[in-house]
Image: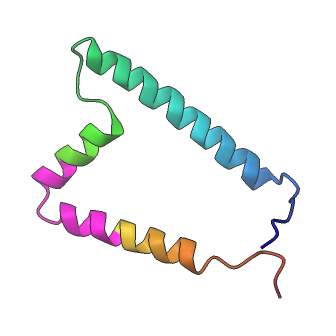
Amino acid sequence: MTVKKRKWSGWRWFWVAWLAMFAIGETAAIIELRKGGDDTTLSEFVWDFVVSNPLGWVGIAVLLVWLFIHFLIQKDSDDS
């Protein structure tokens, strides 16, 4: 299996920026949480949503199934 080197398109830069912003926000939330602040991390938000929403677990399951299928059938953009 060979890996093609691809150009960095605008979308790649978008995802790098998104991941950087997420890492910054999550790190700030973890620091705030350790100082005794609110439950501001993503995992705390998700747990609160799942516990307080009757369909929370269904939503999580649907998201994970979609993500699995998305990665499984991802077509290479150079294929025709």
Q: Position of residue 70 (x, y in %)?
A: 53, 74
Q: Is residue 42 above or below residue 1?
A: above
Q: Which residues are magenta?
A: 49-62
Q: Residue at x 49, y 77 (%)?
A: 69
Percent x, y for residue 2?
Answer: 82, 69
Quarter of the rendering occupied by the C terminus: bottom right
What's the residue at 55%, 77% (across, down)? Answer: 72
Relative image position of residue 23 (x, y in whole percent) = 52, 32
Q: On the picture, is 73 further left or further right than 67?
A: right
Left or right, 73 with respect to 42, comes to right
Asked whether, in this view, residue 80 is left or right of residue 63, the answer is right
Q: Quadrant of the N terminus?
A: bottom right
Residue occupying the point 59% across, 81% down: 73
Per the image, is 70 magenta? no
Q: Is residue 23 left or right of residue 1?
A: left
Q: Work out whether 48 lies above or below 29.
A: below
Quadrant assignment, res 55: bottom left
For the point 85% across and 65% down, the residue is 4
For residue 78, above or below residue 17: below
Q: Residue furthest front?
A: 1
Is 80 above or below relative to 28?
below
Q: Main secondary structure of the magenta part?
A: helix
